[in-house]
Image (spheres, rainbow, N blue to C red):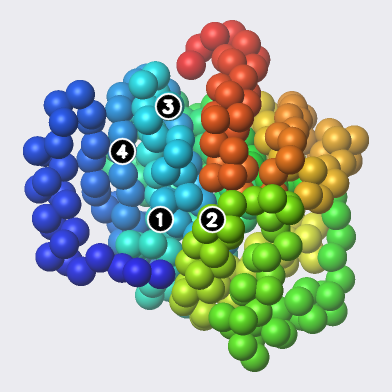
Amino acid sequence: MKRLSLGILLFLLVFAGCTNKNTSVKYDVAISSDSERIAYSTYGAGETSLIFIHGWSCDSRYWQKQLSTFSKHYQVITIDLAGHGDSSLGRLDYTMISFAKDVKAVIEKDNINQAILIGHSMGGGVMAEVARLMPKKVIAIIGIDTLQNVAEELPQKILDEVIEPFEVDFQNAMQAFVSPMFPEGTDGELIRWVKEDMSSAPQEVALSAFRNYMGQYVNNEASQVFKNITVPVVSINARLWPTSLDDNRKHIKNYKLYYIEETGHFPMLEKPEEFNKLLTEALEYIKTENNNDI
């Protein structure tokens, strides 16, 4: 993915102070536990921070259609996980725990006391680890087209077979992988952008992250991570892949499922207005569960 030069990044940091006075935007960098530099942006203000965590081989731009809506009432933070977007990529192994420490670094740098994590796809695995790392800071987590069945078991052989085409020809394998994630009738320009963007991700980063993310379903860690998580856990899922409400409720203590209709894997981009309404509804549900304390 395209990266900003240091000069351009510094320009943006300076320019942020010259933007419209009605819009509060801050660009910053946090240092993760392994010294990776984590780029993040902050919009608006509020007692509760909504921290948006992107999916596999994506970055913070995938939340562009949520910023203006939710920064009116919350502090909104978008993060580029290590190896993605404008963050550094010197890590040897891109695990869900290492990604979670990236988010933890941002929460600690900005002294956030109350966070709701919103994670898309692989971001669902990341946010669960953050909730386990920071139980006093994270008051709820919301997964976007993820956590379809945390109890699902994936044989290692199948995972190896899925990864093999990416090792042989990463760009073409990624484009073939992304295409079925959109239903018929989706805007062609959006499909093209996502395919081109994800297929331009650094191959070694992508393969490491994919092995570790899907590996959770080989070693049952996908369900075990929720063992001590008691905060509300919400899914906003498409119908693209079935979601097992019963299996999830066996492993997640406080689980709520919403469906967004007639979208694929990227509902926040495909149908942003409908998605934003559902996310608002999910936040209201969390407010009720937490006795309106958000």
Residue 182 visible? The answer is yes
Task: Tell me which label, 3 or 1, sits earlier in the chain.
Answer: 3
Task: Tell me which label, 4 or 1, sits earlier in the chain.
Answer: 4
Residue drawn at (10%, 48%), measured in percent from left and top? 14
Q: Measure the alpha-carbon separation of dots 2 and 4.
A: 25 Å
236 lies above or below 163: above
- For badge 3, the amino acid type reads Thr
Q: Measure the alpha-carbon separation of dots 4 and 3.
A: 14 Å
Task: Tell me which label, 2 or 3, sits earlier in the chain.
Answer: 3
Q: Nearer the viewer, residue 21 or 98?
A: 21
Describe the element under mark 4 as helix, strand or loop.
strand
- For badge 2, the amino acid type reads Leu
- In x, y percent, where is residue 186? 64, 51
Residue under label 2:
190
Which numbered marker is on residue 42?
4
Q: Measure the alpha-carbon separation of dots 4 and 1.
A: 12 Å
